[in-house]
Image (cartoon, rainbow, N blue to C red):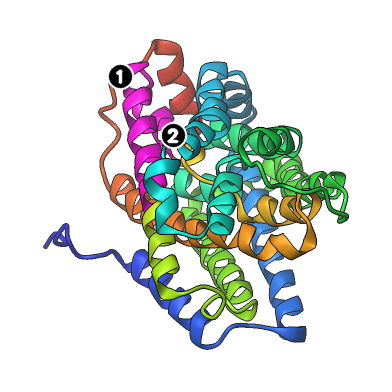
Amino acid sequence: MARPKLLPDNFTLCLVSTVILASLLPVHGQAAVGFNWVTNVAVGLLFFLHGAKLSREAIVAGATHWRLHLVVLLSTFALFPLLGLALKPLLSPLVTPALYAGVLFLCTLPSTVQSSIAFTSIAKGNVPAAVCSASASSLLGIFITPALVSVVVTNQAASGGASPWHTVGNIVLQLLVPFVAGQLLRPLIGKWIERNRGVLKFVDQGSILLVVYGAFSEAVNEGLWHQIPLSALGGLLVVSAVLLALALAVTIFVSKRLGFNRADQITIIFCGSKKSLAAGVPMAKVIFASHAVGAVVLPLMLFHQIQLMVCAALAQRWGARDTTGETHGTSRERAAAAVARR
C-alpha cells in the first residue's frame, strides 16, 4: 500500500526526532568534542564510499559538466543575494535589523557539501557533478563571500579570527582526502560496495542525522531559545521559508528550461538552493566583529534546519520514482548521468 502523500517519510520523521532530541538533550562539553569527532568520521566515511563507488569516467563527466556548475554557482552567489536585497522591504519588518543582516550574510554563503551530495545520492541525481559543484562552491565561497558581504551587508565589521585558509584545510582533509582515498582503493572494494548499496544509503542518511543533531545542539547551547523574542523567531522562520521556496522554485524552473536531464536537475536543485552552516560560522568569525557573530549566524542555523527537512522530503520522494525512462537532455548528458548512476 502506497504511503499517503501528506504523511512524512521515515527519514523526515527521524530528522524531526533528531531536532527535538537536540533541543531537549543537546550535546555539550567534552561530549560535544567527541560527538564532533564522530560526525567528522561519518562525513569522511561518506566521501570515502562515494570515492570508491564512482568510476573515473563518472568523475570526468561530472567535472566537465560546466553548464551545470555555472547554473549552481549563479544560483548560490547571484540569485540568493539578489533575493535578499529585493525582499528586504517586504521581509525585514518581520525580524530585527541585526537578524536581517544575518539573513543577508546567509545569502552570500556557498552551498553545503556533504548534505547536498547525500540528498543528490538519495534522490538518484548526478552524484559526480554534485561532488564537483558543491566542493567548488565551498572553495570559491572563501573568496566570493567576503566580497559579497561588503556589498550587500552594510554593517559588517572586520574582526580577528581564524584564517579563511583554515576552512580550506578542513575541506581538503575532511572531504577531498577521503574521496581520493576511496578512488585509490576502488579496484579493491568497488565491487563490494556495488553489491552492498544499502551501506552507502545508511551512511548518507546517518551522516545527515549526525550533522543535524550537532548543529542544533550547538545552537541550543548558545541560547537559541532565549536570545530572541518569539515574534522575531516566527518572522525569521517565515523569511527562511520564503527564501528557500523561491530558490527551489527558480532552480527547478531554470534547470528544466535549460534542458537538463532529470539527474542533473536534481543536482542543480540540491546544490543551488542550500547554504553551508559549516562554512558560514567560521566565515562570520572572520568577517564580523565578535559581538555581532551571534545574531549573524542565527538565521543561518534556522535556515540550515529548514533546508535539511525540506530537501530530505524531496530527496526521499524523488528517489522513490523510477528514473529508468529518462529521455530528456542531450545524448552527452544522458551518457554522463548513466555513468554517474553506475
Foreground pick, 243 / 93: 93
Main SS of residues in magenta:
helix
Residue bearing mark 1 = 328
Please, what is the three-letter code of the amino acid marked with disc 2? Answer: Ala
Name above or below for residue 188 compared with residue 230.
Answer: above
Q: Secondary structure at mark 1?
A: loop
The quarter in which the N terminus is drawn is bottom left
Q: Earlier in the sequence, mark 1 or mark 2?
A: 2
Residue 230 located left or right of residue 253: right
Q: Residue furthest bottom?
A: 25
Q: CA distance from mark 1 to mark 2?
A: 33 Å
Residue 35 located left or right of residue 81: right
Residue bearing mark 2 = 86
Name above or below for residue 342 compared with residue 40.
Answer: above
Q: Residue 166's x, y, as percent?
A: 85, 50
Neighbourhood count class around disc 2 (C-alpha, 10 Å): few under 14, some 14–19, many 20 upward: few
Which quadrant of the figure has residue 261?
A: top left
Q: Residue 280's x, y, as percent?
A: 67, 51
Badge 1 vs badge 2, beta-carbon distance below 8 Å: no
Name above or below for residue 275 compared with residue 200.
Answer: above
Whether residue 264 appears in magenta in the rendering, the answer is yes
Foreground pick, 274 / 263: 274
Neighbourhood count class around disc 1 (C-alpha, 10 Å): few under 14, some 14–19, many 20 upward: some
User: Magenta segment range?
Assistant: 241-269
Looking at the rendered image, the disc whose residue lies closer to the viewer, 1 or 2, is: 2
Which quadrant of the figure has residue 88?
A: top left
Q: Residue 317's x, y, as percent?
A: 28, 50
Residue 125 located left or right of residue 281: left
- Residue under the point 51% across and 60% down: 96
